[in-house]
Amino acid sequence: MERNLSTSNPGYISLVPRSSKTLSINSFLAYSSKSLGASSFTPESIYPSVASIRQVALPCLAAMTAAHDEKAPSHHENDGFDEKAEVAAVENVSPVGHIPPIEIQARFPLLRDLSQTQMEALNKKVVSKIDWHMMPCVTLMFLMNYLDRINVSNARLAGLQEDLSMTDTVWNAGISTFYVGYLIGQLPGNLLMAKTNPKLFLPTIMLMWSAGTICMPAMTNGAGFCIVRFFIGLMEAPFFPGLTLMTSSWYTKEESPFRMAIWHAGNTISNIISGFLAAGILEHMEGIAGLHAWQWFFLIEGIVSIVVAVVSFFVLPSWPNDTKFLTEEEREMAQYRILVSNGGIDEKVGGTWDGVRDAVKDPFTWYFCLMHFALVTAQSFKDFLPSIMKTFGFNKMTTYLIQAPPYALAYISACLIAWSCGHFMESTYHVVIPIILSAAGCGILIGTINVAARYVGIVLLVCGTYNGLNLQLSWETTVVPAPRAKKAALIAIANCISQVSHWFSPYFYPRSQEPFYRMAGGLLLLGCALTVLSAFLVRWRAQKLNKKLDEQEGWTPNSGVERGWRYKY
């Protein structure tokens, strides 16, 4: 899986050294000379700081490999290399701290003598195993998570609000209290996730929120609605950022956008399923066993979520260094892949609060906070889409069913655009163009009463915002790839800030605004505009930092120097 670096694709890096010859520490510089094919080769033509490589990195790596030869690590150990040596390498190999793949490969005793062909075959095998073990499981988990979050929208159409005698104000308060709990649990939950085993942590919190969902049929008033939704929000808080963190710790920057699209766009599938479930349950189970249809709705979804959580305990992987379905060699390859993608920086360097401090000080964190907040604001319609579609004048059954096509198209477009984003290593315009289409869809919704035109507007609105939010997740984990604690803090802070919009956005959808909801339309357009602004802010900073890296490495298009790790934009 070799990818060449270029100025047009600054994020591409090779996962394997560019030679079919076996590698070793003793042959590193000789190999580098031959692979460059330069008759006037000098070590300085590879990296400006090659003197540091000779004096510091190579003795350090040689000592590490000797230690590994004396005592090979077991699968119970945390890594294939020593953390102190890793820190020293990051600090001394080059002034920018990004380490060539050949040196990273030399750290792993079972990889260091593999040829390019062997490395490529092993990499392909590892990716296939990860895909089959991880992606179906996390996609199903997130689908159930999102079903649990949006089920109240369809339950409202089935009479939940009237049965509990809730005013619009109390209903909106209940929607908002979910996000209060969600906000409180974000940062501590994701930091805990970074330090624990995701194989245990994620299914456990899924069991907790599923128990809350099963309790919802026992609600008798608005206060109970608010309390249960708060608890469910608190339990769900670490799940979404936790999945994002876990995915970015298994997949490279080229692979992450498409993989995140598969599970994150599962929320569009959950909207499709929710519509069909609503049509089947809410229309046909009213009064069975003395329960309202919406009570059956919550019971069935809660029970299914518990089943998925129990299965996940046995299927979900842990971190790359400690997953049982991989062999020891495959675990080393899984770690190697992420180290190369991160520019050689180990995910586990530094402590938890060091990661929080570094994330707070990094401008990227606040640019992505703005982007995530803007996208969630632009997507605030999702909790009220059944109510918006109700204004089309169809009966309940049709209203449930016509929710499916926009979300089906959103899922397809999200996967295609995410693949394009990873393939071309470009993020800015992959976010900006869909969100502009969303703004156009919003304009149609608030500007005409024609049902067909308004339905097209909903399709554009749904597709653009879901695409933007999906790509933002992978983008933030590639510009801040490591350490894991910093990445976890960034994801949690950005997701935490974004949820603030849920405190006020429900109040932009009063029934008095039907059918146009123009006040909400203005809010959606503001979210789209802020998304565009934040995307270009990230692009500007990434270009600025890449220029600085070019200067530090002495890289120009005609310098003959290999271009190292770069920020993706």
Image: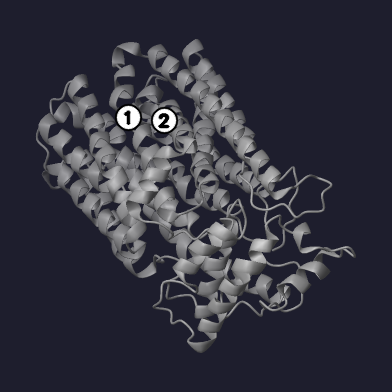
User: What residue is shown at x 48% (from left), y 19% (from top)?
Assistant: 525
**Residue 510 in the image: above or below residue 72:** above
10 Å crowding of disc 2: few (<14), some (14-19), many (20+): many
Q: Residue furthest bottom?
A: 70
List x then y, in percent, for residue 451: 49, 18
**What's the distance in space between the residues labelled 2 and 1, CA to CA?**
8 Å
- Relative image position of residue 568 (x, y in whole percent): 61, 43
Task: Check disc 2 and report the residue beneath it.
Answer: 373
Q: Name the residue that disc number 1 marks.
A: 500
555 over 84 or under it: above or below: above
Camera-side residue: 47 or 448?
47
Mark 2 in CB contact with mark 1 (< 8 angstroms):
yes
Task: Give SS at disc 1.
Answer: loop
The location of residue 413, given as percent across then percent down, is 58, 40
Marked residue nearer the N-terminal end (2 or 1): 2
Q: Viewed as shown, does residue 82 lie left or right of 307?
A: right
Amino acid on which disc 2 is placed: Phe
Q: Quadrant of the N terminus?
A: bottom right
Residue 489, percent from left and from top: 38, 46
Quadrant for residue 154, please give it: top left
Q: Residue furthest left?
A: 220
Which amino acid lies under the numbered mark 1 shown in the image of this protein?
A: Val
